[in-house]
Image (tube, grey):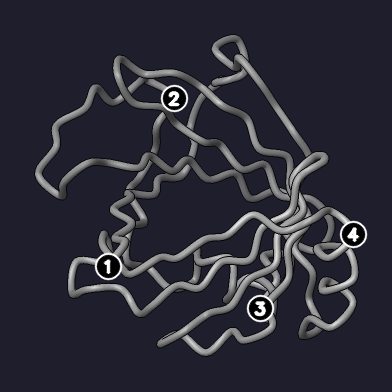
Amino acid sequence: MAQEIERKFLIKGDFKPFVTHSELIEQGYLSSVPARTVRIRVAGERAYLTIKGKGNASGMSRYEWEKEISLTEGRELLLLCEPGIIKKKRHILPSAHLKFEIDEFLGNNQGLILAEIELPSEDTLFEKPYWLGDEVTGDNRYYNSYLSTHPFQNW
């Protein structure tokens, strides 16, 4: 069973000088039920169908299954999603043998910037750059599925 292990952080400093790649992402949810989210994502010229399970007690680990689909299918499936399509610009920043993904949200979630780092295990140590702020791992308000129905601008 595929397991996603990631930690999430707010941003408190300028990360942009370290960005190696950025792309626009549009994603929606066919199901935003926390026990099993079903997401459609269009990232650049690629599209994905992703199913995620509920997180463990720490909020770091959960089941994840992802399959690349055609761009046409992705765009068509976005039209079937629940209201609240997420739009964001994702920035990639390498960090030793890992990488940070910084999501700069647009639209109704503008003003929110989150960093995520995927880890091989929950106890993996990594260097925390100066621009990394408070950890929000396990805080459901920062899940994209929550933000799709409870936009950051309404907090």
Residue under pointer 1: 1
Please rate how many residues cluster around mark 2, counting C-alpha atoms within 10 Å: few if below 14, some from 14 to 19, many from 20.
Answer: some
Measure the alpha-carbon separation of dots 4 and 1: 28 Å
Residue under pointer 4: 72
Query: Pointer 4 and pointer 3: residues touching (CB < 8 Å)?
Result: no
Q: Is residue 49 left or right of residue 135?
A: right
Counting from the top left corner in percent of width and height, residue 7 is at 32, 49
Q: Residue at x 56, y 20 (%)?
A: 14
Query: Pointer 4 and pointer 1: residues touching (CB < 8 Å)?
Result: no
Numbered circles on residues, count: 4
Q: Secondary structure at mark 3?
A: loop
Residue under pointer 2: 131
Q: Secondary structure at mark 2?
A: loop
Question: Looking at the picture, which amino acid does disc 1 mark?
Answer: Met
Measure the alpha-carbon separation of dots 2 and 1: 34 Å
Of the residues under marks 4 and 1, which one precedes in the sequence?
A: 1
- 1 or 3: mark nearer the eye: 1
Of the residues under marks 4 and 2, which one precedes in the sequence?
A: 4
Question: Looking at the picture, which amino acid does disc 4 mark?
Answer: Thr
Measure the alpha-carbon separation of dots 4 and 2: 37 Å
Of the residues under marks 2 and 1, which one precedes in the sequence?
A: 1
The foreground one among 28 and 47 is: 47
Of the residues under marks 4 and 3, which one precedes in the sequence?
A: 4
Query: Pointer 2 and pointer 1: residues touching (CB < 8 Å)?
Result: no
Q: Secondary structure at mark 4?
A: helix
Question: Looking at the picture, which amino acid does disc 3 mark?
Answer: His
Q: Is residue 71 left or right of residue 56?
A: right
- 4 or 3: mark nearer the eye: 4
Residue under pointer 3: 150
- 4 or 2: mark nearer the eye: 4
